[in-house]
Image: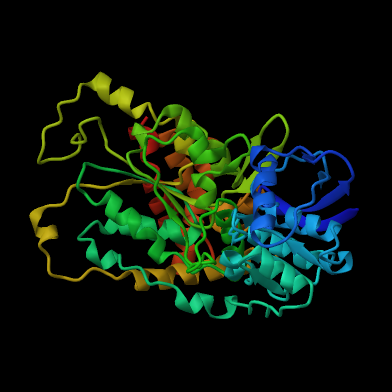
Amino acid sequence: MLAKVASGAVIGIDGILMDVEVDIAHGLPAFTTVGLPEASVRESRERVKAAIVNSGYEFPADRITVNLAPANLRKEGTGFDLPISLGILCATGVLKQDTLSRFIILGELALDGRVKPVAGVLSMAITAKSSGFDGIIVPDGNRKEASVVKGLSVYPVNSLSSAVEFLSGRKEILPEPYTTKHAFEDTEKSTEDFSEVAGQENVKRALEIAAAGAHNVIMVGPPGTGKTMLARRFAGILPPLTFDEAIETTRIYSVAGLLTKKRPLVISRPFRAPHHTISDAGLIGGGHMPRPGEVSLAHNGVLFLDELPEFKKSVIEVLRQPLEDRFVTISRAMTSITYPSDFILIAAANPCPCGYLSDPAHECRCSPVQIQKYRNRISGPLLDRIDLHVDVPALDYKELSSSTPAEPSHKIRERVISARKIQARRFSRSRIRTNANMTSRHIRKYCALDDHTSKTLENAVKRLGLSARAYHRVLKIARTIADLAGAERIEKAHIAEAVGYRTLDRKFL
């Protein structure tokens, strides 16, 4: 007898419908899975058999063939366990086919019949809604994750027997209520605030500009000057996530299996800070079946790379494409997967190997050759893609001991949000959202300069030897500075300040 169950898999962050076809025929007992299954899918036969028997149902002693369609896509993961077992029970007459056809079903089975959570449920819930199914049956551990999709009936099950009882009409399972309504009210306020950072007003100003226009930043200074402290407080001055951004970010975390029962929706901007020993696959994403890397987990948030020159050069060079395109494409022999990676890069670096080149209180013992070799670990093309270059000087005792309270993060955030609203109105008819994403066409339209201001920029380009990309970065930064000031046009003072954030084009290289 033949049975068919609707299930799904996730390719990138997109849910793809899959048909689980189960055929039971007379013959010697066998269990065969076809349709390009990976090892975890082939092993499901042992989990399925044990779960069916231990749940009190009869496992057929016949030839069982399971086909996962479409057969040209590789299948991995354990989410096919529950649909395969229900397909077997349908083929043996325990369940009716017309009832099974109403739902998308996902879930991993334990040997005793318990249903365990799986990754990528949010993407499949979005697909279930758009495909017109009556609902989706998911593990109890994934119920809140799936329920953020408005208008979709989510039926959580904690065991194979409860799924069978529900589908046979002997047990009622109430759909999980829509949970997004109050999710953003539960946002945890950051305990880290800019008011805790003494001095460094020039760096705070640069980070405010970066937050307002979504610009990338590199901070260069001796150890102990507050670079890491400032970076960790940067996410606190960014605007709150919109609902669409939260869903998009949550889909990435769902695919990566990083969601929890307590936090089924990512409601605050991600802050990712990988160690400098990370591999290029860990940073960009990869694997046999490519998984999202740190640049994608930082989507709509912040990627902080501390001690940037200490990263392997092959690792930081792969940042070029995501910094420019805002997405990552990972190609393999059998597939090509694209993950979004629209993040703000905050990098920190010492001025030399010992770190004390610019520190008046410590003597630098590095030779010119060592300093040049250290600085050359960051290539010119990568530095070109970082908008703001900020010197972080060592603080003196007077600044450290000052009792005057510094400006709190929420005040800076208010100005950032106001500037973002100006950009939202400016780009309302285009796909971009911030000044950092402007193309050459947008720059010509929104960054026009008068003759006097243009002459100032021309002199700076010649003096610093800025590349064409760096020239456009200066205009984008100046546009953001003007937005923070509420100015309609870019003025000479805005250009002068923007040029001041490109000094590393000369010094660092």
Q: Nearer the viewer, residue 221 or 180?
A: 180
Asked whether the viewer can see residue 431, the reply is no
Residue 364 rendering spot, x and y as whole percentages? 15, 30
405 with respect to 142 (left or right): left
- Using the image, determine if residue 464 lies above or below residue 416: above
- Residue at horizontal 64%, vertical 63%? 427
Q: Nearer the viewer, residue 241 or 451?
A: 241
Q: Nearer the viewer, residue 329 or 22?
A: 22
- Residue at horizontal 60%, vertical 61%? 114
- Using the image, determine if residue 386 lies above or below residue 509: below
Quadrant in the picture for residue 64: top right
Quadrant in the picture for residue 235: bottom left
Asked whether the viewer can see residue 509, the reply is yes
Residue 327 rendering spot, x and y as whole percentages? 61, 46
* Extreme-top residue of the structure: 369
- The colour scheme used here is rainbow
- Residue at horizontal 40%, vertical 51%? 496
319 with respect to 60 (left or right): left
Residue 405 rendering spot, x and y as whole percentages? 20, 71
Q: Tally the marks.
A: 0
Residue 241 rendering spot, x and y as whole percentages? 53, 67
- Residue at horizontal 25%, vertical 67%? 195
274 with respect to 94 (left or right): left
Q: Nearer the viewer, residue 134 or 82?
A: 82
Which quadrant is the C terminus positioned in?
A: top left
